[in-house]
Amino acid sequence: MNILSNYKAVRKLVAPLLVLALLGTLITGYVGSVRAEEAPPVVLPRFNIPALSEAHIASPLPNVIVVATGGTLAGAARNGDKTNFQSYAAGTYPMADLVAQLPTHKTADVSTFQFGNKGSGSYLMQELYDLSLAVDAALEIYDSAVVTTGTDTMEEIAYFLDLTVRSEKPVVVTGAMRPWDVIGTDGPANLYQAIKVASSNKTKWFGTVLMLNDIIHAAREVTKSNSHRMDTFETPMFGVLGYVDDPAVRIYRLNARALKAGHADWATPFDLRKIAKTSLPAVEIAYNYQEAGGGAIRAMVEDGAKGIVTAGTGAGGISSKMSAARSEAIKKGVIFVTTTRTGSGTIYGGSNGIIAGDNLNPQHARIMLMLSLAFSSDFNTIKGWFETVGTQDITVEETEPPTWAPNSKLTSTTRTSSDITLQWPQAQDNVRIASYAIYKVGDSTPIAKVPASSTSYVVSNLSSGTLYSFVVKAIDGAGLESEELTAQFRTNDVSGNGSPTVTPPPAGEVTIQPGRAGVLGLNDEITVSVPSGATSEQMKLTIEKLLSTGDLVGPTDTLASPIFEVLKSISGNFLVPVSLSFKFDTSLVKEGQKASVFYYDEVTKKWVEMGGTASGNVITVQSDHFTKFAVFVVGDGAVPGVSLSDIGSHWAEAFIKEAVAAGFVKGYTDGTFRPNATVTREEFAVMLMGALRTEGAGADLAFSDKSSIRAWAQEAVAKAVKAGIISGYPDGTFKPGATITRSEMAGMLAKAMKLAPTTNAVTGFADNKDIPAWATGAVKAVADKGILTGRSGNKFAPKETATRAEAVTVMIKMLKAEK
């Protein structure tokens, strides 16, 4: 035996002992490090991974373990019909029997571990959590692993392993298109060749790869393309990694993970040992088609989806109805990823709750989003993971900080009494710009960081008539920062009638690059703001003011602005809604009336009301398409003498007036209350603690996302925590910007009123079974007091979000009940 053989023998003898010690330390150390107040200890599963045999310890060959999950490869033909490739029972034969039927392997010593034995589509995500940990446990002992699965969802299982297995050792996924015992089966050859790939060690640091039909694919990029053919797996756009030829394993290209070999960022953030399997959230896929409706997205949200991947047409486009449903879902905290249904292609941009899926197909993007949501609820963090871990772009070493082109300046396109829109040119870098950081001069912490695709940012909540100094820096992938772009801007003064003056943006026309943001105005009468990610194509945007209204305005219509035709050079709706702001004549709006934005439907030849949010003499709406727009004056049922313009005849009008008089809630600066708007968790905390008039200091906030709690809400949240009204989520977050559900509202009210929840309560609502178990007692307690009532059909609607009108109503009832 040579020196190399002696080394391998010693390594194999010591490996199992080291593994047992490491696993014990790992599990005990991790559980012990969890802070009790953040989350309960994670109980990790244990696996009976076979130890190396004496023969394998003595052998100079590498050792490969086959982790079996079943699938067609382990299938048996039904009724003994060896000629029927489609009628079989998947997951019938144990893997130990199948390996025993193979010729003795020339390149490896092979062991087996039977994780499961069923079709790939039958596995739950929580079982894949266990599978990943089982593979890592096996790789503590063995040199490499082959994972056998069914081919139906093989690409999803492989990508899940690629993102979660922590070991750098080779992991090769394989299976078969024909069951083991029929003529012409591909099972034995695929299993034998996969073992050959694993034992070659050529895919170490590649992450998980997939091998069928003698072809090696990267798990991130592979997809199943045919329901029956044995050459079904393909890698669109990029091509395969390599091939298996007798006797060679040949690799012809490296993937991005292999290029990070030995670096700290090779491992993904998704260490399953740090979360419980129950942390994997529901993530769904919504498929777009001609005139697709929004019902699928609404149903997914109703069913508890925390993330949704849209499989769009072309470069990710979805119908207007789906877009509207997506916008409503985003308001409820659901995160979206845009992909294409075409089978290949890259999606760029993304903003406002929408992440571009790069070239991930919908099923891969779903796995990526599910794992991201399991480890973070922060949109920017998840977006960053998609742009790095999910994108897997080849990176070149960063050597120089970003630079600005000569004469680059920080400018302001639009200013109001409370907002300043900053704009800057694209910076340059020897590799790539990763982001831009925006600061107030003198502050070490940035106001915000925006992705490289954005070259503008709106700084909000500023004081009117005040001079501010800002700094913008470009940051590259290595964290190197550019020189500063610095400028001073003053917010506008509020005019005597309370109407803010607006600094107009540039007029004319503008060309917006794919995925980029842009702003265009015409004089000071209209402003169109296109967010990043709204279009995946270059687009020219133009605005024309119609000098003649022609037949567009009837004799009884009151037009409060000119009619504008906004045009773009490309067809189709926007991927992300754009914002349009119009200046209108406030003198035309009489008591009991309001200004509202309309668009002109060229098919029906009618104006369609869009509504809008008015601030002084400027009204703003969002739209996913361009056409003719104008502001008209309409009646809104406002009652004379009521200071809030939008509560007249509303069912909660009396409660709203009482709440305003009590001082714990107020309207907006535009004179509206917006009774049907949803309420965030931090807003509800402010209302509730204001109603309770709690004195004294609050508790120190220990939420992991406490920096996201806005300054005006921090004191109320702290008091609510100290009073035991708020405890946060099991992952240690508070999620201040998430809309509060009716179940959560009931729970907080019950705690505020110190109502003891009834054990095993039955509420009497028609949808009692849909109320979460943790909230049922609280719902019954506040309902019995008459504080909280149901919605139509005697339904409580536990997952629906509470409105501002509902929030103030229950608080007034709570205060009266306590007297």
Image (spheres, rainbow, N blue to C red):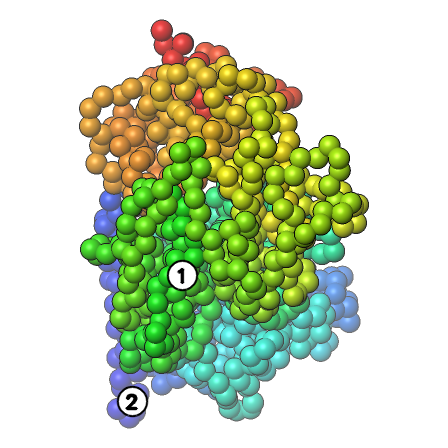
* 378 or 250: nearer the viewer: 378
First in sequence, mark 2 or 1: give its number. 2
The percent position of residue 88, horizontal first and vertical second, equals 71, 62
Q: Is residue 757 above or below residue 242?
A: above
- The answer to whether one can see residue 268 in this image is no
Q: Quadrant of residue 40?
A: top left
> Badge 1, how many Cα within 10 Å: few under 14, some, many 20+?
many
Locate the N terminus by quadrant. bottom left
Question: Residue drawn 45% across and 11% down?
Answer: 785
Q: Position of residue 270 (x, y in %)?
A: 39, 59
Secondary structure of the residue carrying numbered label 2: helix
| Residue located at (40% from left, 50% from top) | 415
Q: Is residue 263 left or right of residue 641?
A: left
With respect to residue 381, does 432 lie above or below?
Answer: below
Give amino acid for label 1. Gln
Which residue matches tag 2? 4
The quarter holding residue 346 reads bottom right
Q: Nearer the viewer, residue 475 or 145?
A: 475
Location of residue 621 with respect to 672 vertically, above or below: below
Residue with the mark numbered 1: 423
Above/below status of 756 relative to 767: above
Q: Position of residue 619 (x, y in %)?
A: 53, 41
Q: Which label sits in the foreground, 2 or 1? A: 1
Q: Nearer the viewer, residue 128 or 792?
A: 792
